[in-house]
Every structure is written in structure tokens, then in C-alpha cells.
Amino acid sequence: MMPSPKLRVLHVYKTYYPDTFGGIEQVIRQIALSTMPLGVESRVFTLSTNARQQRVVHDSGLKVIRAPVTVEIASNAMSLQAIHSFRQAVEWADVLQYHFPWPFGDVLHLLAGKNKPALVTYHSDIVRQKALMHVYRPLMTRFLSSIQAIVATSPNYAQSSDTLQRLKDRVSMIPIGIDETSFPPPDSVLLDSWRERVGEGFFLFIGVLRYYKGLHILLEAMRDADLPLVIVGKGPEEGELQALARTLKLRRVVFAGAVPDDDKMALLALSQAVVFPSHLRSEAYGVTLVEAAMCGKPMITAEIGTGTSFVNLNNETGLVVPPADSAALLKAMTQLEADPERTAEMGFNARRRFEALFTADRMGRDYDALYRRLRKEMAKAA
């Protein structure tokens, strides 16, 4: 088979490694790496508070172009210097891929990106800044109307998002996938070290400690439970959550902090199940859940109408409970604890679902086909 012709894709998002290590940054990396064997060369255009010291960095073979942040309002980073460098980056690219939401990215596209085929990976609605949405909505509408294709990461989100429903004629679905080979296998020394520290058969949360993660609900659920819980991650809610755990006198809750991938894989191997109590639509997918499925672990999630209930199917790969319901959360954890056979079966089902839907190879092929279709359609229209 002849290799596909080379194609250059510019990913555009407000932040990227090494400044931040969030879920969208991980998705960008996985898309870029999974399309590389198919003849796609990717770059990332982003903003950075450190860009004055180093404007170009490299991550896993990707060139990352960074413009300095001028101001940030309501999590929307902006840069006066970005427009010039973005125009240069656009000249290099065959296809532009925006990662939504980032309002300043809309501005960049309308000023400098409209002459290239473009798609949006729609990660989330804007949930928290409801007042600012009245100001932003005209810009958002104009931006999304100018884009040739919009990718939803799950059918659940495509159906529950008012914005995506209005644009459904241009919406396709590509699930987020991850490359299993990019994760180190559990190391025996680390396994022994973590087993000595936290035991095994515990419930595990992994993620940035943000307001929408529902960890306060999880801690409330643990009030009357003698169940072990390990919380991995750092974030703005960390201090309040630790104080709540002390107030509730939760003896079997361990805050492990942020850990590298080899430690994360060891903790996943030792865990009984992954509990992911996000209770607001700001949680659009949950890459942690894909990692759990990859490791054959059952999941407990809340029904919030997003991709969490696409990755985790109720009574098949885990349990899905009502959001912000500590009693239901505790009941689900107790059910898994009491039925190891059912827990193991759900973990097996999660692994099979990962292999069918959530591999990086599948995601890469789908994006590669979309890139090439968009480029071909624009060439025909020219």
C-alpha cells in the first residue's frame, strides 16, 4: 500500500505542555502522535506566560509555537503578539484544528485562518461563565459558522449540547482515544512501594482537583463508609478538600498529589475501581475513564449527559449514578466492594470497550480521513 501524501495540521488551543498538563492537552498530543504514522505532521499553536523566554518548544516530536499571554479574563488567555505569529503558523499548515472552547482562538481564526480548511474539536460547552456568554455568543456563532467540520467526542455530548444540536449538519463523532504503548507498564518496585503506602483494592480518583469534579460529594459519601480511597492530582480545590476530609475524620482517604505516569499506572493496577464523581457538564469526557478502561478497571460515574456515560456504560463497564448524590455514590461503591465477581466482569467489559472504541489508532485514522476530506473539498471549491 502506498503511503498517504504528507499533510500538515496546526492544532490551536490556549495552553499546552510544558505549562499545563490537562485533559485537552493530552488529547492534542494523542491526536498528533496517532496521525503521524499516516503521513500527518502536526504543530501546536498556543499561548504561554513563559513564551518570552522560549517561544518554540518541542514535545514528543511536536513543534509547539507559543505567543506570550497579554491578559487573561475568565480563563480566556489573550495575546496582542499572537496575531502575527499565528499568521506565520497558518501559512505552514494545510489544515487548522481548533480545540473549543477558547474565545481568543475564535478571534485568531477570523483574523488570519479563514483561507485554510478548518475543523473544531468541540470539547465542552461554556458552562460556568453564563453572564459572559451573552457577550461572547455573537463571536462564537460567527466562528463556528465559518468552520467546515465540527467533531464531537461522544454522541451523548452531541445530543445534549444546544450548540451542537444547532450545527448538527456539520457535526461528526470521533471518540477520544489513547495509545496504550505510551504508558509505562506497572513497575514491580513502584507496585511494592505504593502497596506499602496505600494497600490495594482501593477506590481511585485521578484528575485535576477542580470545582466540577464532585470530590466534595465523594468525600461526603465516605463519611459513613469504611472504604479506602486514593485521590491522585492537584488543583485549586485541594486545600478545601483536605480540610473537608479532616472535618469528616476520613481515616482511609489518601491525597497522593500529582504523580507521573509510571506511578499512575501502578496505582491503577492496585485499585479495585475508578470513581469519577464529576457532577457538572464542564466534565465533557474524562480521559481518566479511558485510562481506567484500558487497564480493565470498572468505573463509577455520574449521569451528566456528557461523554462520561459514553465511556462508562451503566451495569456493563461500571455503574452510573445521579449527579451530586452522595448516597447513590456510596451505594455504588458498596455494591462493587461486596461483589468481586461482578466487579471483575465489569472490568473485563471495560477493556473490551476500550479495544473497540478508544484506541489512538482508531482516533488517528478517523482524524486523518477528515483532514484529507476537508483539504480535498476546499481544493475543489477554489
Image (spheres, rainbow, N blue to C red):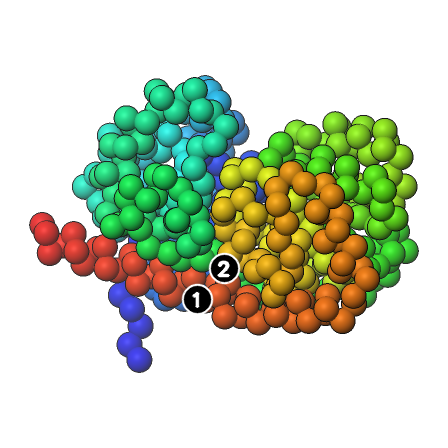
Within-10-Å neighbours for mark 1: few <14, some 14–19, many 20+ = many
Residue with the mark numbered 1 = 362
Residue 244's disc is none
Tags 1 and 2 touching, CB below 8 Å: yes
- Residue 95 position in % (x across, y down): 28, 50
Mark 1 secondary-structure assignment: helix
Q: Nearer the viewer, residue 345 or 122?
A: 345
Decide: is 177 above or below 342.
above
Q: CA distance from mark 1 to mark 2?
A: 7 Å
What's the amino acid at mark 1?
A: Arg
What's the amino acid at mark 2?
A: Gly
In the image, what residue occupies the spot 76% across and 71% down? 341
Q: Quadrant of the N terminus?
A: bottom left
Q: Nearer the viewer, residue 300 or 202?
A: 300
Q: Is residue 328 left or right of residue 63?
A: right
Within-10-Å neighbours for mark 2: few <14, some 14–19, many 20+ = many
Residue 177's disc is 2
The image quadrant that residue 31 belongs to is: bottom left
